[in-house]
Image: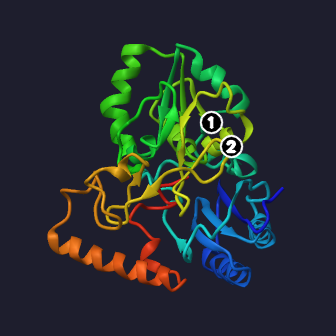
């Protein structure tokens, strides 16, 4: 049941052949604006990827609009609640990929959209074996399983599964290079029986498993529905999840109950900060943090200070300020 006055957050994606993207973009913009839904939706020939926030009825109407499209009939969404709007604006963008890996031969079309062409040629790239959240802990507890976090380093720092390999990437585009430089030698050394990949909502690990299978890896699995589905389905007691889960909206992170977590963003560099980070001398709200203390010039910091002053003035007047929200972390193109 929704908390009183709360807004619904829906994170969703689907790989499916898409056409008339400009027409769908117009429908989504009209429907979202009419219902006061904000967030980001990416559309590409390979599918749809988005996170939106608004009144429950309006969010569900937007999802219903998408489900009327061929190939998206079974579109599912990870749902959670927030006491305030998680986004400052609405963006519906046409892209080459709904999650950017930069490998055009990887096209993980699944479900009702999968099949074969008239000549028998498969449509789409096969993906790894889905693992239900209820079965995930047993798989990753097996010492013969190599657990791989496909997210970026700043996300992993907020929380991850016990014992997972952190590729240390700054962008999902770096994943193929990491596979060749690090994962392949690691697999040859350890000879794991299974590779278990995961990400926030499932989209990155789905594309990553398709890539691994295309490159000849075997025993490839991934967490169905991603971390968000795991946190919803698996009780915290005994869970192998550690920390919080970074999310690509103004909540910054969510805890095991999918409630807004303890992290905030540095609005200078856009990276997540723990409560401990915010008591360091390097942290000046809106100006600097431990991640970016040496990245910006004094001229930049003066500009950041003036922006923060304007944000504080707007808050004192009971007004919002657009400079208090957006950040340079890409979302959700490199997100869920």
- Residue 137: image x %, image y %? 64, 24
> Which label belongs to residue 237?
none
Instruction: Point out the frontmost of discs 1 and 2.
Output: 2
First in residue order: circle 1 vs circle 2:
1
Left/right of residue 161 with respect to residue 61 in the rendered view: left
Query: Quarter holding the N terminus?
Result: bottom right
Judge by depth and name the residue closer to the eye, 170 or 310.
310
Verify CB contact (< 8 Å) between mark 1 and mark 2: yes
Write the residue at 42% across / 83% down.
313
Q: CA distance from mark 1 to mark 2?
A: 9 Å
Write the residue at 18% across / 56% down.
294
Height in image: 162 above or below 228?
A: above
Left/right of residue 114 with respect to residue 168 in the rendered view: right
- Residue 169: image x %, image y %? 36, 44
Write the residue at 55% across / 37% down.
198
* Mark 1 secondary-structure assignment: strand
The local crowd at label 1, few if under 14, some if 14 to 19, many if 20 or more residues have their Cα within 10 Å, is: many
Write the residue at 62% across / 21% down.
139
Q: Residue furthest left?
A: 298
- Residue 86: image x %, image y %? 59, 67
Specify whether residue 132 is in view.
no
The local crowd at label 2, few if under 14, some if 14 to 19, many if 20 or more residues have their Cα within 10 Å, is: many
- Residue 273: image x %, image y %? 40, 52
Residue pointed to by mark 2: 229
* Mark 2 secondary-structure assignment: helix
Height in image: 305 above or below 290?
A: below
Left/right of residue 198 with respect to residue 321 in the rendered view: right
Specify whether residue 47 is in view.
yes
What colour-coding does the image apply?
rainbow
Judge by depth and name the residue closer to the eye, 288 or 174.
288
Q: How many marks?
A: 2
Residue pointed to by mark 1: 223
């Amino acid at each position: 049941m929704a908390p009183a006055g709360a807004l619904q957050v829906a994170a969703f994606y689907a790989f499916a052949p898409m056409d008339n993207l400009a027409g769908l973009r117009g429908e989504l913009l009209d429907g979202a604006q009419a219902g006061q839904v904000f967030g980001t939706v990416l559309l590409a020939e390979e599918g749809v990827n988005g996170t939106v926030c608004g009144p429950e009825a309006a969010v569900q109407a937007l999802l219903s609009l998408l489900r009327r499209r061929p190939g998206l009939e079974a579109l599912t969404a990870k749902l959670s609640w927030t006491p305030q709007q998680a986004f400052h604006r609405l963006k519906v963008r046409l892209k080459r990929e709904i999650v950017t890996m930069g490998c055009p031969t990887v096209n993980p079309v699944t479900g009702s959209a999968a099949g074969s062409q008239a000549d028998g040629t498969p449509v789409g790239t096969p993906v790894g074996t889905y693992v239900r959240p209820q079965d995930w802990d047993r798989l990753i507890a097996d010492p013969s399983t190599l657990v791989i976090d496909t997210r970026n380093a700043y996300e992993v720092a907020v929380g991850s599964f016990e014992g997972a390999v952190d590729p240390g990437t700054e962008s999902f585009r770096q994943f193929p290079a990491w596979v060749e430089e690090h994962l392949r030698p690691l697999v040859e050394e350890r000879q794991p029986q299974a590779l278990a990949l995961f990400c926030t909502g499932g989209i990155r690990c789905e594309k990553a498993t398709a890539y691994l299978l295309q490159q000849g890896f075997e025993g490839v699995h991934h967490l169905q529905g991603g971390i968000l589905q795991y946190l919803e389905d698996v009780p915290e007691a005994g869970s192998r999840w550690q920390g919080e889960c970074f999310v690509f909206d103004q909540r910054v992170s969510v805890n095991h109950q999918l409630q807004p977590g303890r992290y905030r963003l540095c609005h200078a560099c856009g990276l997540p900060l723990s409560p401990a980070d915010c008591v360091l001398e390097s942290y000046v709200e809106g100006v600097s943090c431990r991640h970016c203390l040496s990245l910006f010039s004094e001229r930049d910091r003066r500009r950041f200070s003036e922006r923060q002053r304007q944000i504080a003035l707007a808050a004192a007047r009971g007004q919002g300020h657009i400079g208090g929200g957006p950040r340079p972390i890409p979302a959700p193109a490199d997100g869920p």
